[in-house]
Image (cartoon, rainbow, N blue to C red):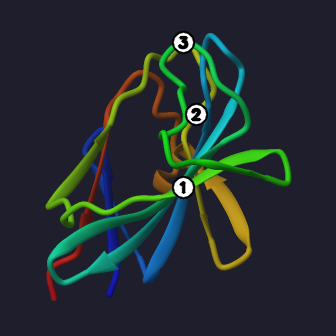
Amino acid sequence: MSLCVASAGVIKTLAVAAFTLAWTHSIEKTEWQEDWRVTPQGLELIAARVKGSGAGMEPAPEARLVDGWFQWRVTRPPQRELMLGNSGMAGEWRLCAEGGCRSFSEIVGHPIGAQPITLISCPD
């Protein structure tokens, strides 16, 4: 399986079966991460974790504090696509896979700024 990343007219294909989305909340300055799997049915959210809580950053009720992170499992159907918004006023989304993280600007090869990012499971 592969992940397709589209933003500002550029589409990149990443050969990953699983990835983590990471970002820092623009107001709370709190780190948030989500673990995703690329499947033929779409993108499946597996787990989420947050370093604290605050405006719009509340951990799920079943979250457990582990090594400074509130962590929980997520059970929902795979998503056909994932649209990531960018205010242009906060730090950038990062995609982590295979032991490293890169900003989406690095992935698409130019600054994204306030442009949205779309992620989908690439068609075979």
Q: Which residue is mark 1?
A: 72
Work out how far the residue at label 2 is from the one at label 3, CA to CA, in angstroms.
Answer: 19 Å
> Residue 1's x, y, as percent?
32, 87
111 relative to 82 in the view: left or right: right
Instruction: Please name the amino acid that badge 2 sits on.
Output: Glu
* Vertical comparison of 84 with 4: above or below: above
Q: Mark 2 vs mark 3: give the one in front.
A: 3
Q: Report which quarter residue 90 is drawn in.
A: top right
Q: Residue at x 18, y 65 (%)?
A: 77
Q: Which residue is mark 2?
A: 92
Answer with mark 2 or mark 3, whichever residue precedes in sequence. 3
Dot 1, how many residues are within 10 Å of its Cα: few (below 14), some (14-19), or many (20+)?
A: many
* Vertical comparison of 53 with 13: above or below: above
Q: Which residue is mark 3?
A: 55
28 relative to 112 in the view: left or right: right
Q: What mark, if any, has residue 109 been given in the picture? A: none
Dot 3, how many residues are within 10 Å of its Cα: few (below 14), some (14-19), or many (20+)?
A: few
- Residue situated furthest right in the rendering: 67
Instruction: Please name the amino acid that badge 3 sits on.
Output: Ala
Q: Residue at x 22, y 75 (%)?
A: 122
* Vertical comparison of 34 with 2: above or below: above
Q: Mark 2 vs mark 1: give the one in front.
A: 1
